[in-house]
Amino acid sequence: MSTEKPDTGAAETDVLTVEELAKMLRISRASAYRAVGSGQVPGTVRINGKTLRVSRRAVVAWLAQGSVSPDDGVKRR
């Protein structure tokens, strides 16, 4: 009997937790939850009404765009 995990076709790192997203963006966990909750972060999925997961590819593409909307909640000087 094999003890190998089944191949799902995606690496485990393709999907991030909000905590992993916070580390990736170098922001606080609370800021990451606020950004996800407000819809600012693309590729976010809510599972079973509670658990949040974020697509790493969507976040990387979003960051590569280098643009944010004027109503992104970021205070500018």
Image: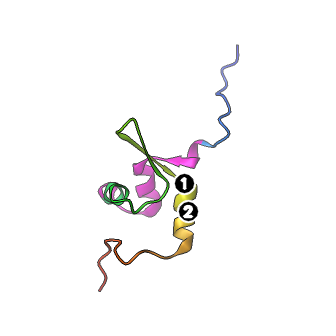
The dot on residue 47 is: none
Please give the name of the residue rendered at 44% of the width and 63% of the height, measured from the top-left corner: 25
Image coordinates of residue 72 in percent, x first then y, are 35, 71
- The residue shown at (68%, 33%) is 7
Q: Quadrant of the N terminus?
A: top right
- Viewport quadrant of the C terminus: bottom left
Residue 21 part of the magenta-drawn span:
yes
Q: Is residue 56 magenta?
A: no
Percent x, y for residue 30?
Answer: 29, 56
Residue found at x 70% / y 18%: 2
What stretch of residues is rendered in magenta? 12-30
In the rendered structure, the answer to whether residue 8 lies left or right of residue 21 reads right
Residue where numbered disc 2 is placed: 60
> In the figure, residue 21 lies in which quadrant?
bottom left
Q: Which residue is mark 1?
A: 56
The image shows residue 22 at horizontal and vertical percentages of: 40, 57
Please rate how many residues cluster around mark 1, counting C-alpha atoms within 10 Å: few if below 14, some from 14 to 19, many from 20. Answer: many
- Residue 23 percent coordinates (x, y): 43, 57
Given residues 8 and 69, the one toward you in this image is 69
Quick check: 73 above or below 10? below
- Mark 2 burial class by Cα count in 10 Å: few <14, some 14-19, many 20+: few
Please tell me which residue is depicted at 40% across the width and 50% down the height of the picture.
19
Front residue (pair 30, 44): 44
Q: How is the image coloured?
A: rainbow
Q: Mark 2 and mark 1 in contact (Cβ < 8 Å)? A: yes
Type of residue at label 2?
Val
